[in-house]
Image (tube, rainbow, N blue to C red):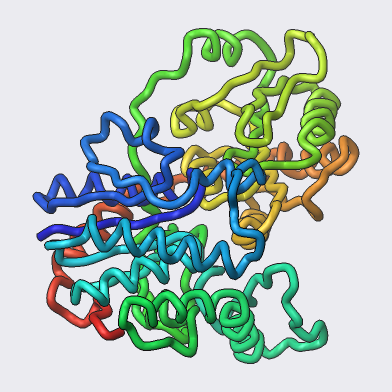
Amino acid sequence: MRIVLVTYGSRGDIEPMAALALQLQDLGVGVRMCAPPDFAELLDGTGIPVTPIGWPIRALAIGALGGLPKTLADIAAKLTAMIYEAVATAANGCDAVVATGSPPAMAGARAAAEKLGIRYLATALSPYQLPSPHHKPVFRPGSLMPPEEVDRRVLWDFNAEHLNELFGEPVNTHRASIGLPPRDNIRDHILTDKPFLAADPVLGPWPQPAYLDVTQTGAWIRPDERRLPTSLQAFLEAGTPTVYVGFSSMPMRAATEIARAAIEAVRAHGGRVLLNIGWANLALIDERNDCFVVGEVNQQALFHRVAAVVHHGGAGTTTAAASAGAPQLVVPQGVDQHYWADRVTELGLGMGHDGPTPTAGSLSTALDVVLAPQTVARAAALAKTVRADGAEQAAKLLLEMKGHRGFATAPG
C-alpha cells in the first residue's frame, strides 16, 4: 500500500502529518508527504520523502511574496492548480491521498485523487473545522452572516455558502480545465461526510449526535527526542519559575508591544520569561537576566519544566502544553485558536484572553487565574488523560479501511 499525505499550512499542519507518515512507515506502508517548501529542513532526517508544494507559507502569511496574484480568487485558483499538479505526480501509482490544510489546497488534492481514480480521505485537526450542532463555525472576514442568527444548522449553511463565494469559482474552473465536473458545495466536497479528526477526545471532543460520520483518532503527535540546549537548561534551573511565551507560526503586527506586555505581566507575578522568537520575531525589551530567548525547541521536553505556557492557541501547542500538565494562557489570533482558547477555559486548564492584542494589565489579570493552585492542579490531573497514540491509531485504521467505504472515491 502506498499513500500520499498532503498538507498546506503552518507548523501545526505539518507536524501531525509527519507523525502519521512515520507510523505508516513503521507498518510497512510506502508514504510520501506533500508540504510547503518552508519545512524541508524540519522534515529532513525523518526518512519521509517530501514533495514541495505551493508558495513558501511564511512569505505568504507575512505578505512578503513577490508576484502573488492580486485577488483572493486568483490566489485560490493558482494554489488549487499548483497543489493538483504536485499531488497528481506524487500520487501516481499510489492507493490513496490523505489531505488537510487550506480549502483550495485540499480541493487540489481531491481533484488529483479523482483524476487518478484513487481514494481520498480528509482530515481535520480541530473539531471547529467540521460542521456540528455542538459548535458554531468561525466566519472569515467579509462574511455576511446575520448577527442575530443562533440556529447552528443555519449558521453552518451560511458557512458553506461563504466558502462557495470565496472558492467555488476558482476551484470549479480548475476542475473543468482537467475534465472533472463542478461541485456545488466546496466545503462538503473537500471534507467529505466521513473525515478523520486528529484531535484528543478530551481536549477537543466530537459529541453526538453529529452531522458527519467522523472518526476521531486522537491527536497525531510526532515524538521529539531532542535534548534542550545546555544554556536553556541552565536558565530553567537558575531561578524562580519560568513562563514560556511564544506564538509559533503566527505573524503578529503588534509583536513588540505584545512581547513587552508579556514580560511585564510575568515580572509582576515574580516569574521569569522564556521568549520564543517564532514568526512574530518576538524580542527582549531590556538586558535584564530574568528573560531568555529561544528559537526552535522541543516543546514536549520544555513544557514539563515551565510554570505556564502563554501562546496563540494552535492545536499542536495546546495539546503539547496539556500533555505536559502546564497551565495555559491562550491569546487567540484567528481560526481554530478561539476554539482552543474556549476549551482551555472550559476544562480549567487556564484562561483564554479576550482579544488578540493583550496589555500588561490584561495578561497580569489572566495570569492570576493561570498560576492559581487550583489551575495548576487541574492541568496536572488532566495531563494523565491526554492520549499519545492518535497517529498510530490512524495508521492502523487506514490499513483497515483500504478498499472500504471510509475513503471517498472518484467521482466523489
Q: Position of residue 289 (x, y in %)?
A: 73, 8
Query: Looking at the rendering, which quadrant does residue 153 occupy?
Result: bottom right
Query: Looking at the image, which residue is at 79% across and 22% down?
Result: 270
Screen quadrant of the C terminus: bottom left
Answer above or below: position of 362 versus 207: above
Q: Position of residue 306 (x, y in %)?
A: 59, 27
Answer yes or no: is residue 344 visible. yes
Quadrant for residue 175, please give it: bottom left
Q: Residue 208's x, y, as percent?
A: 46, 82
Between 310 and 305, the residue placed more toward the observer is: 310
Identify the image quadrant of residue 308: top right
Residue 358 vs residue 188, the one in the foreground: 188
Q: Is residue 374 visible?
A: no
Could you tell me residue 328's position as x and y percent? Answer: 64, 43
Q: What's the residue at 63%, 61% (across, down)?
A: 335
Q: Residue at x 51, y 27 (%)?
A: 296
Left or right of residue 48, residue 103 in this image: right
User: Could you say which is closer to the camera, residue 70 or residue 19?
Assistant: 70
Q: Quadrant of the N terminus?
A: bottom left
Asked if residue 191 is positioned above or below residue 14 in the image, the reply reads below
* Left or right: 249 in relation to 174: right
* Residue drawn at 80 percent across, 54 percent down: 355
In this rendering, the answer to whether 187 lies above or below 310 is: below
Question: In the depicted view, which residue is nearer to us: 380 or 133?
Answer: 133
